[in-house]
Amino acid sequence: MKSNNILFTIMGIITFLCSIFGCQAQNTKGHSLSVDEFEKQIADTSVVRLDVRTLEEYAEGHIAKAINIDVLESDFESKAVSLLPKEKTIAVYCRSGKRSKKAVDILAKHDYTIIELSTGYNGWVTAGKEVTNK
């Protein structure tokens, strides 16, 4: 009877610890931000702005000073790792927020600090934020 209580206590502690560390691991992937929060973060000139849409989408308009690496291309990971500085925060966005999550997953494997625009470029434009095609 006593051994069952000890076993249940140990299992409870293990479950508790797994849930704590599991949540922390999720948070290291990146933070999804609203348009206004994202705008505040990228005002810091040390933050690298990364547009992960296609080249055609990027050419039609993008957030100023963003570099473009298409997350759907097979060489996205190698390009990103070779071009993006690890010591800087990477601010990722796509059209609607779906592809950027894929980019966050890939970059997180390489220990980047990442923020992501939750509503994507569409949300940025809808909010009346500044864009460029240069």
Image (spheres, rainbow, N blue to C red):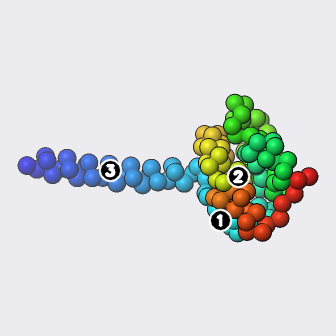
Alpha carbon distance from label 2 to label 1: 14 Å
Counting residues from the start of the chain, the first of labels 2 and 1 encountered is: 1
Please name which of the two marks, 3 or 2, marks the residue nearer to the observer: 2
Q: Residue at x 57, y 51 (%)?
A: 28
Secondary structure beneath disc 2?
loop
Element on which disc 3 rests: helix
The crowd level at tag 3 (other Cα within 10 Å; few <14, some 14-19, many 20+) is few
Which residue is label 2 attached to?
95
Q: Amino acid at mark 1?
A: Ser
In the image, 35: left or right of 55?
A: left
Question: Residue at horizontal 84%, vertical 51%?
Answer: 60
For the residues labelled 1 and 3, the Cα–Cα distance comes to 33 Å
If you read the primary sequence from the N terminus, does the residue marked by circle 3 or circle 2 appear first?
Answer: 3
Residue 69 picture quarter: top right
Q: Amino acid at mark 3?
A: Thr
Q: Is residue 53 left or right of residue 59?
A: left
Measured in 3D between alpha carbons, the distance from the residue under mark 3 to the one under mark 2, in whole angstroms, is 38 Å
Q: Residues within 10 Å of mark 1 (few under 14, many from 20)?
A: some
Eye-nearest disc, 1 or 3: 1
Q: Name the residue that disc number 1 marks.
A: 34
Residue 111 appearing in the image: no
Q: Nearer the viewer, residue 101 or 83?
A: 101
Residue 56 visible in the shown view? yes
Image position, residue 15 (x, y; %): 32, 50
Q: In the image, what residue type sits under mark 2? A: Arg
> Along the polypeptide, which appears first: circle 1 or circle 3?
3
Q: Which mark is residue 15?
A: 3
Residue 51 is situated, as x and y percent measured from the top left of the image, at 76, 49
